[in-house]
Amino acid sequence: MSSPPVVTAAAPTSRPSRSAAAPPVRAPSSSAAAGTGLLALPTEGPHGPNSLAAAGSTCIADGNTLCLLGGRFQVRVTRGGNPQPALPLTDKSGAFWFFNAANTEVVIKVLDGTPINGSYWVFLGSMSDQDYSVTVTDTVTGAVWSHVNPLGTYCGTADIAAF
């Protein structure tokens, strides 16, 4: 009887391509984060002054906020500027709903990929064609990763170099 084949995977050498229908939010060219795919932390968030976590702050979970990987990552989803309800699943994942708690619309997972490529990874599963925005904030560095899903698109995304 022969042994099963050994499968090895090399770390990706480039970032995965993104759907043209749902482009990621990018930093302005004058930002220090330009070209990284990360946004510089704004001084005012979508919910008022200081509503986004500042570098070195702690994530505080509430009905609209997930805290993942021991509270390092704060995750929020908004529709029309309004925060959407969060459903914690594990320390690495959670979900959001828009119309009914029994109907999950968005699932998100953050993984520590630093042993593989030096980055934290973000995976987003969309089960909705609604318009929404996802914001993941690294509370240690203040870096922000965002994804905008336009109305009528059915697309999730993954970023293995998000942070």
Image: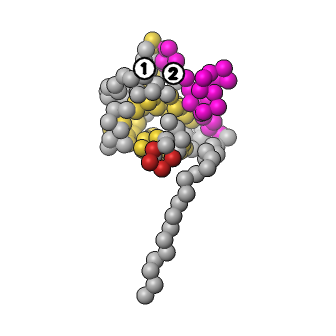
> Can residue 113 be seen in the rendering of this structure?
yes
Disc 2 secondary structure class: loop
The amino acid on which the numbered mark 1 sits, given as a three-letter code, is Ala
For image coordinates 43% across by 22% down, the residue present is 55
Disc 1 secondary structure class: loop
Q: Which residue is mark 1?
A: 54
Q: Quadrant of residue 3?
A: bottom left
The magenta stretch spans residue 19: no
> What secondary structure characterizes most of the magenta part?
loop
For image coordinates 34% across by 32% down, the residue present is 71
For image coordinates 32% across by 28% down, the residue present is 61
For image coordinates 58% across by 51% down, the residue present is 12
Residue furthest top as drawn: 49
Neighbour class for label 1 at 10 Å: few (<14), some, many (≥20)?
some
User: Which percent across, then down, holds residue 7?
Assistant: 50, 67
> Can residue 77 be seen in the rendering of this structure?
no
The amino acid on which the numbered mark 2 sits, given as a three-letter code, is Leu
Q: Which residue is mark 2?
A: 41
